[in-house]
Image: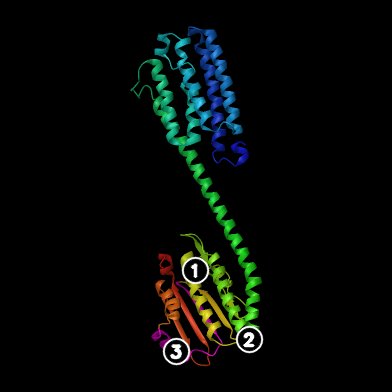
Amino acid sequence: MTPTTASPDPAAPLWRAAQGFRLLSCGYALYFQVAVNDDLARRGLAWALFGVLLAWSAACGWAYLQGVGRRPAWVAAELAVAVALILSTDVVASDRWIADNQSWPTTLWATNATISAAVLRGPVLGMAAGLVVMAAVAALKGSVSLNLGRNATIVIELAVGLAVGMAALTARRAHAELERATRLAALVSERERLSREVHDGAIQVLALVARRGREIGGVAAELADLAGEQERALRRLVSGWQDGPPGAHADLAALLRARASDTVSVSLPATPVVLPAGIAAEIDAAVGNALDNVAAHAGAGARAFVLLEDVDDAVVISIRDDGHGIPVGRLEQARAEGRLGVAAAIVGRLEALGGTAVLTTAPGDGTEWEFTVPREGVADGRG
């Protein structure tokens, strides 16, 4: 299967442009052949070799346009043919003619091999092919011309190999980046689809079982607790799916939206709240811990309300519930007993981001968390 059939070649436009150059160089070679033929020692042989030049040029043009020639073996063969035709000048022309003129097939036509090597493998191989062409010319003339003011052919060969090679390298890198971005977009889309399916299916069912089990009580309450634990675990998993690769960004609003359920109401801005993916994940995890506490300690039937605000210089999240609140001294007692869930999972996370987590609670009045993360800390990528 050829490269053009198997997968798009990012350097295909360069291959097409190179064949345009090949056509022009063949036209110049024909003009040169007609102009100097009378001065050659073996005119008939020169025309026969010119026929080889045209046939090989046509074969190369077809092979590169179709894609079958875009491989090292074909480019090496093109370079070998170019060198052979350059050296054949010694057969069709006299020593005096060789000393006073360029090689018979013209170095412009031989530059096609330099261009093909550069498109195939980049600037290094392109410049190397240019040096091979110039070495063949030097071998023909028996000397190396260092007078670049009068003969800058070697500079042109190197410049062509460098410029075309860099263009091909850039095209392939841009294509690779585009493919990576396309794969990432497809992956994110699939994760979002799975998140919606899990949220609309398993999570909603588990939330319903947990709520109805607490209402029934007794043995059903134990099943409700298990269902609640699995619901929270699934929500953390869904949130984890939405984390991006290092250096990526995420929509905090989308992460929090996945936490909505029968017992959790989420209010979000109309526009995405885009943050570095790691920071968004940390904020979302802190919100998840606060909601876990509501489910575990606020009492049966307690509802939670999450509000996300994107103000000028900070991101503010409020988590409020209508449960029975936290008794006075309960948090201090838990900390003294070594249970650091609130301190580490919530307050510690927010402080690591340069933000704050403020808890307001009283017996019978529910609880309210207010998380504030300054935009300056987000921009610095803290956390």
Q: Do the residues labelled 2 and 3 touch (CB within 8 Å)?
A: no
Residue 360 is at least partly visible in this image: yes
- Up the image or down, 239 lies above or below 216; here it is above
| Residue 69, position as x, y percentages in the image | 57, 31
Q: What range of the chain is rendered magenta?
A: 313-337
| Residue 23, position as x, y percentages in the image | 56, 25
* Mark before the other along the chain sequence, 1 or 2: 2
Residue at (51%, 82%) from the top-left corner? Answer: 293
Q: Name the residue under label 2.
A: 219
Label 2 sits on what residue type? Val
Colouring scheme applied when the structure was drawn: rainbow
Magenta span contains residue 322: yes
Q: Mark 1 points at which residue?
A: 281
Label 1 sits on what residue type? Ala
Q: In which quarter of the image is residue 149?
A: top left
The label on residue 330 is 3
